[in-house]
Image: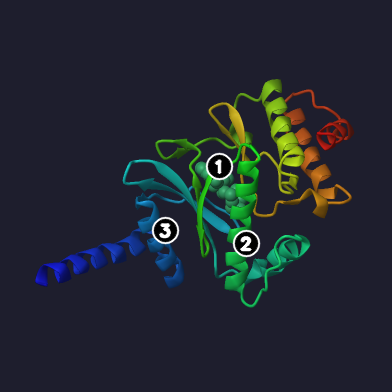
Protein backbone atom coordinates (compact mmCIF):
# COMPACT_ATOMS: atom_id res chain seq x y z
CA UNK A 1 0.00 0.00 0.00
CA UNK A 2 2.62 2.41 1.17
CA UNK A 3 5.02 1.43 -1.59
CA UNK A 4 2.44 1.96 -4.29
CA UNK A 5 1.59 5.37 -2.95
CA UNK A 6 5.22 6.36 -2.81
CA UNK A 7 5.64 5.16 -6.37
CA UNK A 8 2.79 7.32 -7.52
CA UNK A 9 4.23 10.32 -5.74
CA UNK A 10 7.59 9.84 -7.37
CA UNK A 11 5.98 9.59 -10.76
CA UNK A 12 3.92 12.70 -10.13
CA UNK A 13 6.97 14.65 -9.04
CA UNK A 14 8.72 13.68 -12.23
CA UNK A 15 5.72 14.77 -14.28
CA UNK A 16 5.67 18.21 -12.76
CA UNK A 17 9.41 18.55 -13.32
CA UNK A 18 8.77 17.72 -16.91
CA UNK A 19 6.32 20.57 -17.34
CA UNK A 20 8.91 23.01 -16.07
CA UNK A 21 11.80 21.76 -18.15
CA UNK A 22 10.06 21.18 -21.45
CA UNK A 23 8.56 24.56 -21.95
CA UNK A 24 7.32 26.91 -19.31
CA UNK A 25 4.99 28.50 -21.84
CA UNK A 26 2.84 25.38 -22.30
CA UNK A 27 -0.63 25.73 -20.93
CA UNK A 28 -2.13 23.02 -18.72
CA UNK A 29 -4.00 21.25 -21.50
CA UNK A 30 -0.88 21.14 -23.71
CA UNK A 31 1.16 19.78 -20.77
CA UNK A 32 -1.41 17.05 -20.16
CA UNK A 33 -1.58 16.21 -23.87
CA UNK A 34 2.21 16.03 -23.92
CA UNK A 35 2.24 13.66 -20.98
CA UNK A 36 -0.19 11.38 -22.80
CA UNK A 37 1.93 11.40 -25.97
CA UNK A 38 5.16 10.78 -24.06
CA UNK A 39 3.71 7.76 -22.26
CA UNK A 40 2.15 6.42 -25.42
CA UNK A 41 5.35 6.62 -27.50
CA UNK A 42 7.85 5.99 -24.70
CA UNK A 43 9.37 9.44 -25.03
CA UNK A 44 11.77 10.18 -22.18
CA UNK A 45 13.45 13.43 -23.10
CA UNK A 46 12.29 16.46 -25.00
CA UNK A 47 15.04 18.76 -26.13
CA UNK A 48 15.02 22.49 -26.75
CA UNK A 49 12.84 23.73 -29.61
CA UNK A 50 14.36 23.48 -33.08
CA UNK A 51 12.38 26.39 -34.33
CA UNK A 52 9.35 28.39 -33.46
CA UNK A 53 7.21 29.69 -36.26
CA UNK A 54 4.00 31.65 -36.19
CA UNK A 55 1.83 28.63 -35.56
CA UNK A 56 3.95 25.95 -33.96
CA UNK A 57 7.20 24.89 -32.34
CA UNK A 58 9.10 21.72 -33.23
CA UNK A 59 11.14 19.74 -30.68
CA UNK A 60 13.39 16.69 -30.95
CA UNK A 61 12.08 13.99 -28.61
CA UNK A 62 14.13 10.97 -27.53
CA UNK A 63 12.50 7.63 -26.78
CA UNK A 64 13.49 4.98 -24.26
CA UNK A 65 15.12 3.12 -27.16
CA UNK A 66 17.14 6.25 -28.01
CA UNK A 67 15.24 6.93 -31.22
CA UNK A 68 14.48 10.50 -32.08
CA UNK A 69 11.03 11.73 -33.03
CA UNK A 70 9.93 15.21 -34.01
CA UNK A 71 7.21 16.76 -31.86
CA UNK A 72 5.27 19.64 -33.37
CA UNK A 73 3.30 21.67 -30.86
CA UNK A 74 0.68 24.05 -32.26
CA UNK A 75 0.06 27.13 -30.18
CA UNK A 76 -3.39 27.12 -28.68
CA UNK A 77 -3.42 30.69 -27.50
CA UNK A 78 -2.81 32.82 -30.57
CA UNK A 79 -6.10 34.30 -31.64
CA UNK A 80 -4.33 36.31 -34.32
CA UNK A 81 -4.05 33.51 -36.82
CA UNK A 82 -7.58 32.25 -36.26
CA UNK A 83 -8.66 34.07 -39.40
CA UNK A 84 -5.93 32.59 -41.57
CA UNK A 85 -6.61 29.10 -40.24
CA UNK A 86 -10.33 29.26 -40.86
CA UNK A 87 -9.72 30.55 -44.36
CA UNK A 88 -7.50 27.59 -45.21
CA UNK A 89 -9.78 25.06 -43.61
CA UNK A 90 -12.83 26.50 -45.37
CA UNK A 91 -10.99 26.26 -48.69
CA UNK A 92 -10.26 22.60 -48.18
CA UNK A 93 -13.22 20.46 -49.18
CA UNK A 94 -12.06 17.46 -47.14
CA UNK A 95 -11.95 19.20 -43.79
CA UNK A 96 -15.23 20.63 -42.72
CA UNK A 97 -14.32 21.71 -39.24
CA UNK A 98 -16.89 23.36 -37.03
CA UNK A 99 -14.87 26.14 -35.52
CA UNK A 100 -16.57 26.55 -32.19
CA UNK A 101 -13.43 27.77 -30.46
CA UNK A 102 -9.84 28.61 -31.29
CA UNK A 103 -8.84 25.39 -29.58
CA UNK A 104 -11.06 23.30 -31.84
CA UNK A 105 -9.62 25.11 -34.80
CA UNK A 106 -6.06 24.36 -33.72
CA UNK A 107 -6.85 20.70 -33.01
CA UNK A 108 -8.45 20.56 -36.44
CA UNK A 109 -5.35 22.09 -37.95
CA UNK A 110 -3.08 19.50 -36.26
CA UNK A 111 -5.32 16.68 -37.54
CA UNK A 112 -5.28 18.22 -40.98
CA UNK A 113 -1.49 18.30 -41.11
CA UNK A 114 -1.40 14.73 -39.84
CA UNK A 115 -3.93 13.59 -42.46
CA UNK A 116 -1.99 15.34 -45.21
CA UNK A 117 1.28 13.78 -44.05
CA UNK A 118 -0.33 10.36 -44.01
CA UNK A 119 -1.78 10.73 -47.48
CA UNK A 120 1.55 11.93 -48.87
CA UNK A 121 3.52 9.25 -47.04
CA UNK A 122 1.22 6.51 -48.32
CA UNK A 123 1.55 7.85 -51.86
CA UNK A 124 5.32 7.43 -51.58
CA UNK A 125 6.19 11.12 -51.31
CA UNK A 126 9.28 11.82 -49.26
CA UNK A 127 7.80 13.35 -46.08
CA UNK A 128 8.50 12.58 -42.41
CA UNK A 129 6.62 9.44 -41.42
CA UNK A 130 3.59 10.48 -39.35
CA UNK A 131 3.19 8.68 -36.01
CA UNK A 132 0.47 10.29 -33.97
CA UNK A 133 -1.76 13.31 -33.55
CA UNK A 134 -3.30 14.17 -30.20
CA UNK A 135 -5.02 17.48 -29.50
CA UNK A 136 -2.51 20.15 -30.58
CA UNK A 137 0.45 17.77 -30.80
CA UNK A 138 1.78 15.96 -33.84
CA UNK A 139 4.57 13.41 -33.72
CA UNK A 140 6.52 12.40 -36.81
CA UNK A 141 9.82 10.95 -37.91
CA UNK A 142 12.79 13.10 -36.92
CA UNK A 143 14.84 14.25 -39.90
CA UNK A 144 18.38 14.37 -38.68
CA UNK A 145 21.00 12.44 -36.77
CA UNK A 146 21.46 12.16 -32.99
CA UNK A 147 18.94 14.88 -32.30
CA UNK A 148 20.57 17.33 -34.72
CA UNK A 149 18.14 18.25 -37.47
CA UNK A 150 18.98 18.03 -41.15
CA UNK A 151 19.54 21.33 -42.99
CA UNK A 152 16.70 23.14 -44.70
CA UNK A 153 17.19 23.58 -48.44
CA UNK A 154 18.17 27.24 -48.01
CA UNK A 155 20.91 26.22 -45.55
CA UNK A 156 22.25 23.42 -47.70
CA UNK A 157 25.61 24.05 -49.36
CA UNK A 158 25.60 21.57 -52.18
CA UNK A 159 22.81 22.83 -54.46
CA UNK A 160 23.06 20.82 -57.66
CA UNK A 161 21.08 20.13 -60.82
CA UNK A 162 20.47 16.64 -59.44
CA UNK A 163 18.92 18.04 -56.27
CA UNK A 164 16.63 20.25 -58.37
CA UNK A 165 15.51 17.20 -60.37
CA UNK A 166 14.88 15.33 -57.11
CA UNK A 167 12.67 18.15 -55.85
CA UNK A 168 10.71 18.08 -59.12
CA UNK A 169 10.33 14.32 -58.72
CA UNK A 170 8.76 14.85 -55.30
CA UNK A 171 6.40 17.48 -56.69
CA UNK A 172 5.46 15.06 -59.47
CA UNK A 173 4.65 12.39 -56.87
CA UNK A 174 2.63 14.86 -54.82
CA UNK A 175 0.55 15.84 -57.83
CA UNK A 176 0.45 12.56 -59.73
CA UNK A 177 0.09 10.06 -56.89
CA UNK A 178 -1.22 11.93 -53.85
CA UNK A 179 -3.19 14.49 -55.94
CA UNK A 180 -2.13 17.21 -53.55
CA UNK A 181 -0.64 20.68 -53.83
CA UNK A 182 1.73 21.73 -51.04
CA UNK A 183 0.75 25.40 -51.33
CA UNK A 184 3.58 26.75 -49.16
CA UNK A 185 6.51 25.18 -50.91
CA UNK A 186 9.86 26.95 -50.68
CA UNK A 187 13.47 26.47 -49.58
CA UNK A 188 12.14 26.83 -46.00
CA UNK A 189 9.79 23.84 -46.17
CA UNK A 190 12.15 21.32 -47.73
CA UNK A 191 14.85 19.61 -45.68
CA UNK A 192 17.82 17.82 -47.17
CA UNK A 193 18.24 14.54 -45.35
CA UNK A 194 21.07 12.24 -46.46
CA UNK A 195 21.38 14.21 -49.74
CA UNK A 196 17.70 13.89 -50.65
CA UNK A 197 14.89 16.41 -50.34
CA UNK A 198 12.13 15.79 -47.80
CA UNK A 199 8.97 17.89 -47.94
CA UNK A 200 7.74 19.29 -44.60
CA UNK A 201 5.06 21.61 -43.19
CA UNK A 202 2.03 20.28 -45.07
CA UNK A 203 -0.69 21.74 -42.82
CA UNK A 204 -1.93 24.04 -45.57
CA UNK A 205 -1.65 21.51 -48.38
CA UNK A 206 -4.80 21.06 -50.43
CA UNK A 207 -6.24 18.58 -52.86
CA UNK A 208 -5.37 19.23 -56.48
CA UNK A 209 -9.12 19.48 -57.15
CA UNK A 210 -9.29 22.39 -54.69
CA UNK A 211 -6.82 24.31 -56.86
CA UNK A 212 -8.79 24.42 -60.13
CA UNK A 213 -6.87 27.38 -61.58
CA UNK A 214 -3.56 25.92 -60.42
CA UNK A 215 -2.87 29.16 -58.63
CA UNK A 216 -1.18 27.43 -55.67
CA UNK A 217 0.71 24.92 -57.77
CA UNK A 218 1.99 27.75 -59.96
CA UNK A 219 3.18 29.69 -56.93
CA UNK A 220 4.96 26.60 -55.53
CA UNK A 221 6.75 25.96 -58.81
CA UNK A 222 7.77 29.59 -59.21
CA UNK A 223 9.20 29.56 -55.69
CA UNK A 224 11.23 26.44 -56.36
CA UNK A 225 12.52 27.80 -59.65
CA UNK A 226 13.38 31.15 -58.08
CA UNK A 227 15.44 29.45 -55.37
CA UNK A 228 17.33 27.05 -57.63
CA UNK A 229 17.98 29.64 -60.30
CA UNK A 230 19.36 32.01 -57.65
CA UNK A 231 21.86 29.24 -56.89
CA UNK A 232 22.95 28.97 -60.50
CA UNK A 233 20.84 25.98 -61.53
CA UNK A 234 19.26 25.81 -65.00
CA UNK A 235 15.58 25.61 -64.24
CA UNK A 236 12.81 24.38 -66.51
CA UNK A 237 10.02 26.79 -67.47
CA UNK A 238 7.06 26.58 -65.08
CA UNK A 239 4.69 25.85 -68.01
CA UNK A 240 6.77 22.87 -69.03
CA UNK A 241 6.90 21.49 -65.47
CA UNK A 242 3.15 22.00 -65.11
CA UNK A 243 2.50 20.06 -68.29
CA UNK A 244 4.71 17.22 -67.24
CA UNK A 245 3.48 16.90 -63.63
CA UNK A 246 -0.17 17.10 -64.66
CA UNK A 247 0.24 14.39 -67.27
CA UNK A 248 1.45 11.83 -64.72
P1 LIG B 1 6.30 26.15 -39.22
O1 LIG B 1 4.83 26.17 -39.45
O2 LIG B 1 6.70 26.75 -37.93
O3 LIG B 1 7.07 26.68 -40.40
P2 LIG B 1 7.52 23.54 -39.83
O4 LIG B 1 6.74 22.28 -39.96
O5 LIG B 1 8.07 24.13 -41.08
O6 LIG B 1 6.61 24.58 -39.03
O7 LIG B 1 8.68 23.26 -38.81
C1 LIG B 1 9.49 24.28 -38.28
C2 LIG B 1 10.95 23.87 -38.31
O8 LIG B 1 11.15 22.68 -37.54
C3 LIG B 1 11.45 23.53 -39.70
O9 LIG B 1 11.93 24.69 -40.36
C4 LIG B 1 12.57 22.56 -39.40
O10 LIG B 1 13.76 23.27 -39.07
C5 LIG B 1 12.08 21.83 -38.16
N1 LIG B 1 11.41 20.55 -38.47
C6 LIG B 1 10.14 20.39 -38.92
N2 LIG B 1 9.82 19.09 -39.08
C7 LIG B 1 10.93 18.39 -38.72
C8 LIG B 1 11.26 16.98 -38.67
N3 LIG B 1 10.36 16.05 -39.01
N4 LIG B 1 12.49 16.63 -38.26
C9 LIG B 1 13.39 17.58 -37.91
N5 LIG B 1 13.15 18.90 -37.93
C10 LIG B 1 11.94 19.32 -38.33
MN1 LIG C 1 7.73 25.86 -42.21
In the displayed orientation, state which residue is furthest to the bottom: 100
> How far across and how far down the image is residue 150, in percent?
52, 35
For label 3, the SS is helix
Of mark 3 and mark 1, the one earlier in the sequence is 3
In the displayed orientation, state which residue is furthest to the left: 2
- Mark 3 → mark 1, Cα distance in angstroms: 18 Å
For label 2, the SS is helix
The reply to whether residue 201 is in sight is no
- The residue that mark 2 highlights is 109
Of mark 2 and mark 3, the one earlier in the sequence is 3
Please say if the residues under marks 3 and 1 sit with CB atoms less than 8 Å apart: no
Q: Where, by quadrant of the figure, is residue 109 drawn?
A: bottom right
Please say if the residues under marks 2 and 3 sit with CB atoms less than 8 Å apart: no
- Mark 2 → mark 3, Cα distance in angstroms: 18 Å
Residue under the point 83% across and 27% down: 236
Q: Is residue 31 left or right of residue 6?
A: right
The reply to whether residue 204 is in sight is yes
Q: Is mark 2 within 8 Å of ligand 1?
A: no
Label at residue 106: none
Label at residue 128: 1
For label 1, the SS is loop
**Front position in the image: 212 or 152:** 212
> How far across and how far down the image is residue 169, in percent?
71, 30
Of mark 1 and mark 2, the one earlier in the sequence is 2
Q: Residues within 10 Å of mark 2 (few under 14, many from 20)?
A: many
- Mark 1 → mark 2, Cα distance in angstroms: 17 Å
Q: Where, by quadrant of the figure, is residue 163 drawn?
A: top right
- The residue that mark 3 highlights is 37
Quadrant of the image for the N terminus? Answer: bottom left
> How far across and how far down the image is residue 4, in percent?
15, 68
> How far across and how far down the image is residue 223, in percent?
76, 40
Amino acid sequence: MNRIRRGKEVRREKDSDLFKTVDSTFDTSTSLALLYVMRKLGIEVIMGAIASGKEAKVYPAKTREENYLALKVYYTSTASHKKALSRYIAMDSRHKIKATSTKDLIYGWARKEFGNLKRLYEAGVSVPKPYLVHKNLLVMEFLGHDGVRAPLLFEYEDITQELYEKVLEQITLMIGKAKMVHSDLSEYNIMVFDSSPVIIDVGQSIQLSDDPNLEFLNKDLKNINRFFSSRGINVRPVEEILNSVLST
